[in-house]
Image: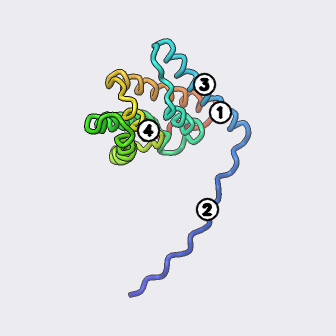
């Protein structure tokens, strides 16, 4: 029995250009969320704004339908990646080699937990390079993730977009 050859793939096209008001509102939501992290961090005298969280907010505000943008992935992916970073840190100590391993392993952990969130791999790298206090870092990271989701929810209401597509 012979099988027919697979059809040739259809050339992919880039997504349509978003309307100006969608760009403006998504950008505003992202800026507000990151300013909220800075403000809460100032009140707590602890930084809440780390680079991976800016990338997380870009996903939430700019691509709210993606699995990477859902609350489960934003909060869960960040926390699981941080835990992965701490686990690697315990084995290797702080350093660039362990950071590379942590960043890669974080992807596998997030995939197994069904919490894909690409910016979170950078969180594992940061943990392994910086060796932050365990409980304080996890608590602040959870708070930051929840704040991003909350601003994403508010922004979705203002912009008329649906967010989240699912919670768990």
Left or right of 156, for residue 72:
left
Say above or below: 149 vs 118.
above
* Pointer 3 with pointer 4, Cβ within 8 A: no
Q: For mark 3, what is the residue?
A: 32
Mark 1 or mark 2, which is nearer the start of the sequence? 2
Mark 2 or mark 4, which is nearer the start of the sequence? 2
Picture coordinates of residue 106 (x, y %)? 37, 43
Q: For mark 2, what is the residue?
A: 12
Q: For mark 4, what is the residue?
A: 120
Mark 1 or mark 3, which is nearer the start of the sequence? 1
Q: Which element is circle 3 on? A: helix
Mark 4 or 1: in front is: 4
The N terminus lies in quadrant:
bottom left
Label 3, label 4: how far apart the Cα atoms are: 20 Å
Picture coordinates of residue 24 (x, y %)? 70, 34
Q: For mark 1, what is the residue?
A: 27
């Amino acid at each position: 029995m012979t099988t027919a050859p697979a059809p040739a793939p259809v050339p992919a096209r880039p997504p349509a250009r978003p309307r100006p008001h969608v760009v403006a509102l998504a950008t505003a939501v992202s800026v507000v969320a990151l300013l909220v992290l800075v403000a809460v961090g100032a009140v707590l005298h602890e930084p809440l704004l780390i680079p991976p969280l800016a990338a997380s907010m870009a996903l939430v505000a700019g691509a709210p339908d993606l699995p990477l943008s859902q609350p489960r992935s934003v909060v869960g992916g960040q926390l699981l990646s941080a835990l992965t970073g701490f686990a690697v840190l315990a084995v290797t100590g702080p350093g660039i080699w362990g950071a590379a391993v942590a960043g890669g392993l974080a992807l596998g952990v997030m995939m197994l937990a069904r919490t894909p969130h690409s910016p979170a791999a950078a969180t594992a790298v940061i943990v392994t390079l910086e060796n932050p206090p365990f409980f304080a870092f996890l608590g602040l990271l959870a708070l930051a993730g929840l704040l991003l989701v909350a601003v994403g929810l508010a922004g979705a209401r203002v912009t008329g977009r649906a967010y989240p597509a699912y919670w768990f």
